[in-house]
Image (spheres, rainbow, N blue to C red):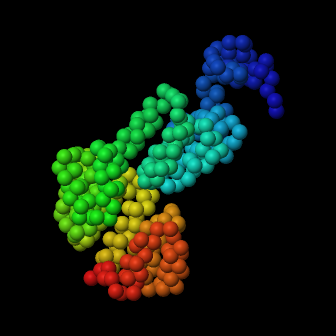
């Protein structure tokens, strides 16, 4: 039944009265004049305040999405999903969703910012750097929090370069002369003790010569200065693993996963720690999870191959090993085959 706004529903209400009960007061701002008690009574299922605010929030979110992506409602929902994944530090999934956003809307500045953040935390530095092209010559001042996060990431790029850029040429000139390179690196660190990249690379040199205590010390120094520098987490976890300090190694990986819950390298590190402890079933479960995140990642394929091997799943191991041999990066293939053949010991 349609309601005629000009006729009171009940009583003898006038223009300044409730149209239902006739009392001389009504809530302003509504098409039909009703007092507060009558309006609540007409609601069959009263809405709690928190539910009401949630509904308003969803409505605003949808409108916001439509405003940003007027041509595609799906694109707007995909973008909001990406932001939720980013909040959960699930950066691989977020990066994939944001890549699609920028494919559909390459001019979308905020999308490019979030894409750079996700790619950076996935250690996809080239992709993160390329995202900056989207906002070349542009400015925006309304999203202070996003600007701060972008600046943090941009600041993090410096940890992948030497303080003295000339040392890049020194390192390249030494080629495969590891002795000369290590000597030059030690001298450089003495001159630049706060250079995070140099300290990390020197720690890696110590790791290669099984000087794990020195590795621990330098990695700890790097992570204190640059807690977002993820390569140091992997090296420190590996050093603890080789020292059989498995609890410490696992704790480092868990810290790492707080930065990026989908960090492939963190999950691979955990697989190796579990395999060293002969927790083969758990290692396989972890490896399969990581493989689902990035099935073409060389490190994951290596870890999953080892997990299949130690779980005696030879059919799956050999099928994956065949894929590994076709991968562009086969530098570690010899060691992997040696472990499988039993000529290279992997664990006690």
Left or right of 220 on screen, residue 74: right
Quarter of the picture holding the C terminus: bottom left
Residue 40, how many percent across, how many down? 61, 31
The residue sitting at the front extreme is 173
Q: Look at the picture and state if 308 lies above or below 116.
A: below
Quarter-of-image position of residue 172: bottom left
Q: Look at the picture and state if 159 lies above or below 201.
A: above
Camera-nearest residue between 223 and 177: 177
Q: Residue at x 47, y 84 (%)?
A: 313
Q: Residue at x 39, y 87 (%)?
A: 341
Q: Residue at x 33, y 61 (%)?
A: 175
Quarter-of-image position of residue 67: top right
Left or right of 116 on screen, residue 222: left
Can residue 109 be spotted in the picture? yes
Can residue 118 be spotted in the picture? no
Left or right of 323 on screen, residue 237: left
Residue 335, how many percent across, how many down? 37, 77
Residue 136, how many percent across, how many down? 52, 34
Camera-nearest residue between 277 and 182: 182
Camera-nearest residue between 184 and 94: 184
Count the numbered circles shown.
0
Residue 269, how many percent across, how many down? 36, 66
Q: Residue at x 31, y 82 (%)?
A: 345
Quarter of the picture holding the N terminus: top right
């Amino acid at each position: 039944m349609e309601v005629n706004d000009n006729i009171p529903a009940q009583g003898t209400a006038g223009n300044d009265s409730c149209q239902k009960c006739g009392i001389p007061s009504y809530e302003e701002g509504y098409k039909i004049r009703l007092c507060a008690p009558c309006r609540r009574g007409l609601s069959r299922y009263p809405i709690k305040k928190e539910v009401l605010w949630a509904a308003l929030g969803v409505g605003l979110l949808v409108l916001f999405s439509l405003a940003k992506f007027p041509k595609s409602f799906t694109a707007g929902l995909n973008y909001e999903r990406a932001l939720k994944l980013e909040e959960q530090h699930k950066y691989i999934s977020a990066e994939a969703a944001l890549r699609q956003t920028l494919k559909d809307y390459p001019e979308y500045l905020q999308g490019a910012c979030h894409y750079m953040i996700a790619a950076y935390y996935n250690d996809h530095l080239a992709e993160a750097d390329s995202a900056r092209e989207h906002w070349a010559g542009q400015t925006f001042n309304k999203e202070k929090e996003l600007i701060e996060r972008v600046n943090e990431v941009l600041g993090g790029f410096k940890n992948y370069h030497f303080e003295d850029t000339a040392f890049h040429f020194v390192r390249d000139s030494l080629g495969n002369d590891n002795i000369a390179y290590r000597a030059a690196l030690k001298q450089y660190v003495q001159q630049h003790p706060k250079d995070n990249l140099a300290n990390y690379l020197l720690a890696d040199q110590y790791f290669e010569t099984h000087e794990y205590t020195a590795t621990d010390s330098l990695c700890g120094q790097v992570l204190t200065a640059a807690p977002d520098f993820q390569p140091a987490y992997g090296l420190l976890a590996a050093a603890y693993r080789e020292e059989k300090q498995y609890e410490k190694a696992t704790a480092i990986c868990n810290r790492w996963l707080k930065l990026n819950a989908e960090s492939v390298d963190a999950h691979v590190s955990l697989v190796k720690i579990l395999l060293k402890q002969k927790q083969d079933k758990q290692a396989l479960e972890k490896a399969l999870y990581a493989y689902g995140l990035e099935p073409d990642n060389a490190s994951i394929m290596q870890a999953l191959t080892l997990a299949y091997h130690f779980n005696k799943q030879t059919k799956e191991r050999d099928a994956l090993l065949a894929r590994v041999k076709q991968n562009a990066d086969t530098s570690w293939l010899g060691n992997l085959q040696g472990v499988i053949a039993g000529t290279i010991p992997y664990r006690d």
